[in-house]
Image (spheres, rainbow, N blue to C red):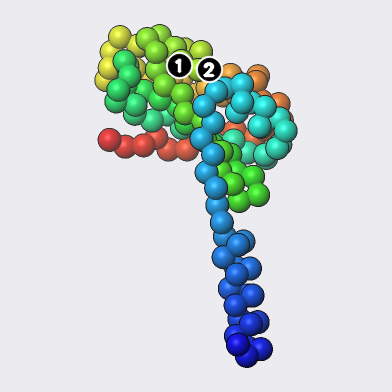
Amino acid sequence: MNTYLKISYKIVACVLEATTITVYRIKTWEHFKALVTSLKPSTVYYLTQPHPLRKPPLGLRLTFYNRGDIYVFIDYADAKVLHKTGIPITNPSDAVNADVSEYDIRNFLAKELDDVNLVSLPPFMY
């Protein structure tokens, strides 16, 4: 192998290594909260999304990024509240109009996650 190919190979390997992204699905609220506390991301993104297998069909996704890795926490409706966080659901008996208010989400996250910028993303469309 000549010198040019060795150098090119090393450059390509560095570029490929730098673009590796790992997505971590966090299953418990306590674990997600501990990761936010220890990794100290500047921003946590959240959005409500459909969760068709739940009653009402509603969910909440929380995401943050740290050094190229993505951390995702998904909560879902369980009657009148979100199952893992306990955030209340408005109109829980109405599958079409059930919702989690922006105020309740922001209030809960601001109380639980200190000094984190909270950004609401547009909801998923059906």
**Tag on residue 61?**
none
* Relative image position of residue 64 (x, y in whole percent): 58, 39
Front position in the image: 82 or 3: 3
Whether the residues at callouts 2 and 1 have beta carbons within 8 Å, the answer is yes
Q: Which quadrant does the N terminus fall into?
A: bottom right
Q: Amino acid at mark 2?
A: Thr
In this picture, residue 66 sits left or right of residue 47: right
* Relative image position of residue 52 (x, y in whole percent): 29, 25
> Which residue is at 70% across, 37% downward?
39
Q: Mark 2 = which residue?
A: 85
> Which residue is at 65% across, 49% downward?
67
> Which residue is at 59% across, 35% downward?
44
> Which residue is at 64% across, 35% downward?
117
Mark 1 neighbour class, 10 Å CA radius: few under 14, some 14 to 19, many 20 or more:
some
In this picture, residue 104 sits left or right of residue 33: left
* Relative image position of residue 69 (x, y in whole percent): 59, 47
Q: Evaluate whether residue 104 shows in this view.
A: no
**Tag on residue 82?**
1
